[in-house]
Amino acid sequence: MTYFLIRRFTSLLITLALATVVIFAVMEIVPGDPAQIILGIGATDETLAALRQQMGLDQPLITRYLQWVSGMLIGDFGTSYTYAVPVWELIAERTIVSLPLALIALALSTIIAIPTGIFAASWRGKAPDTGIMGLTQMGIAIPNFWFAMLMVYVFAVMFQLVPAGGFPGWQAGIFVALKSLILPAIALALPQAAILARVTRSALLESLGEDYIRTARAKGLTRSMVLWRHALRNALIPVLTIMGLQFAFLLAGTIIIENVFYLPGLGRLIFQAITQRDLIVVQSTVVLLVATVILINFLVDIAYAWVDPRLHAERS
């Protein structure tokens, strides 16, 4: 197991290093001059050259890349071109919105999806299973931003139960802050719950068709005992994979939802930085999100060994 952890951690570091190279290269080939965007079209060449020198844009690419990576290793993500503040401050301000939103959405998705998938699998081929699969297909097909706008109209405009958008900050009180996150969390959770429910159902049905399930039934175990004690644990392996990917998506892929609800999160920060050509903010934020995704996948891989002892034995 130790060798497996070392090997996986080494792979994590290599993947992260390659990701920094790709992200830096992509940002460099994107058209647009940050200095020109900041100063406007009426700026003189001398003023543009002075600003590029001040921002370090006149240095060779390899020098800028090494300075950027070495800075991140010590916690220095650089200074925003637009806001003139350290990037880590911007990320910290937005993370306290995006992280709780992602956690709430993942919790809602899991609470809805896993029991739904188990229930559908236990009624395979019957009316409840057909109905649930039809609803999950609709959940996958409907865009979450359209569903978000529908919920804003119903719950915020018609019934006025929750705010239509904005985030008052945690200093306004936990209940008030959570109230502003509940609609975007539901809008994010339902499509992910539809995917997770289908994966849970498929994985559980595959486990129920294995030989050891037939052996357990032959020994006299009831259907519910076979389902909960034997089939479900093995079915959790692909479910864990999807949950890890979903959390990464919920943390990094909320650009549209955060703009619909006007939430000051990481997704909106990336969108604003792209439109303002604030390269250092985009690069550092995306690298941080990539590192989070890689770390989550690493933790999910370790969780496999806990769920399935056979994998633990193989890796040992």
Image (tube, rainbow, N blue to C red):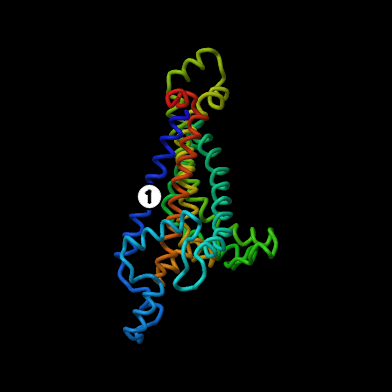
Q: Amino acid at mark 1?
A: Ala
| Label 1 element class | helix
Estimate the x, y position of residue 18 in percent, counting from the top left. Answer: 35, 50
Circle 1 crowding by C-alpha within 10 Å: few under 14, some 14–19, many from 20: some
156 left or right of 260 in image = right
Q: Is residue 131 among the parts visible in the rendering?
A: no
Nearest the viewer among 199 and 58 is 58
Q: Can you say whether 203 is above or below 144 in the image?
A: above
Q: Image height check: is 172 above or below 293?
A: below
Name the side, left or right, on which 207 lies relative to 160.
Answer: left
Rendered location of residue 98, percent (x, y): 54, 57
- Residue behind mark 1: 17
Where is residue 208? Give x, y as percent: 46, 25
Q: Is residue 7 above or below residue 57?
A: above
In the rendered view, would you say 308 is above or below 136? above
- Which one is in front, 137 or 276? 276
Q: Residue at x 46, y 18 (%)?
A: 212
